[in-house]
Image (spheres, grey):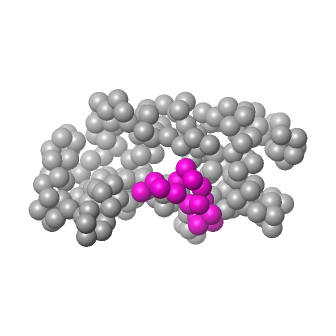
Amino acid sequence: MGTTASQLPKELLSEYQELTFLTKQEILLAHKRFSELAGKEDRHHPNPRVPMSKILMLPELKSNPFRERICQVFSTSDVKDGSLSFEDFLDLLSAFSDSATLEIKSHYAFRIFDFDDDGTLDSSDLEKLVNCLTGDTDDTRLTAEEMRQLISNILEESDIDKDGTVNLSEFQHVISRSPDFVSSFKIVL
């Protein structure tokens, strides 16, 4: 722990604890993992960014069907490349932690599922979401009719204002009725 603690000043560690749902130990472990991903060449850079390709190698994300969207949503990169700074990485881990609130988890889940970033889940977003969950291969892909019916059912259950899309508050309403959501929306280091 000696080198990890010395690389992360106590003031920053305290600030990160206040701003996230992570414990001191989780933050130190996250810093160690991030530093390993950044590699020797970036370790001494004042604000290194880890490319999405390296983040996707983490075992916790490797098999997640939304792994690329997760990186895109949490990335603050100006070039929208999905790369993560250490603070982006902490935000990701915090949102997926056991201690994060249902409101935080559902907010980020909504953003991850909103593939076109327009603030609503429309038929196109829902189709991409279903394809991520079922796999987009000939063996697993739903037929056009099955997909149309499933999207129709989702909108029937979720679209309270009947505008043909699901907004954040409608999404959160649906999630609030799903007790398994919080336990399934997590990443543990």
| Percent position of residue 105, x then y | 45, 39
Percent position of residue 95, x then y: 53, 41
Give the vertical position of 106 relative to 61 (above or below). above
Asked if residue 167 lies left or right of residue 48, the reply is left
Instruction: Report the magenta residues as a range.
Output: 51-65
Q: Residue at x 56, y 60 (%)?
A: 56
Whether 102 is among the magenta residues is no
Q: Residue furthest front?
A: 139
Q: Is residue 17 visible?
A: no
| Along the viewing direction, whichever of 112 and 119 lies nearer the viewer | 112
* Residue found 72% across the figure and 33% down from its top: 24
- Residue in the image at 70% along x and 53% along y: 34
In screen coordinates, is 157 left or right of 22?
left
User: Is residue 79 among the parts visible in the rendering?
Assistant: yes
Front residue of 165/39: it is 39
Give the x, y percent position of residue 11. 81, 36
**Which quadrant of the rendered structure holds the C terminus?**
top right
Q: Quadrant of residue 29?
A: top right
Q: Give the position of the N terminus as an image quadrant.
A: top right
Q: Nearer the viewer, residue 100 or 135?
A: 135
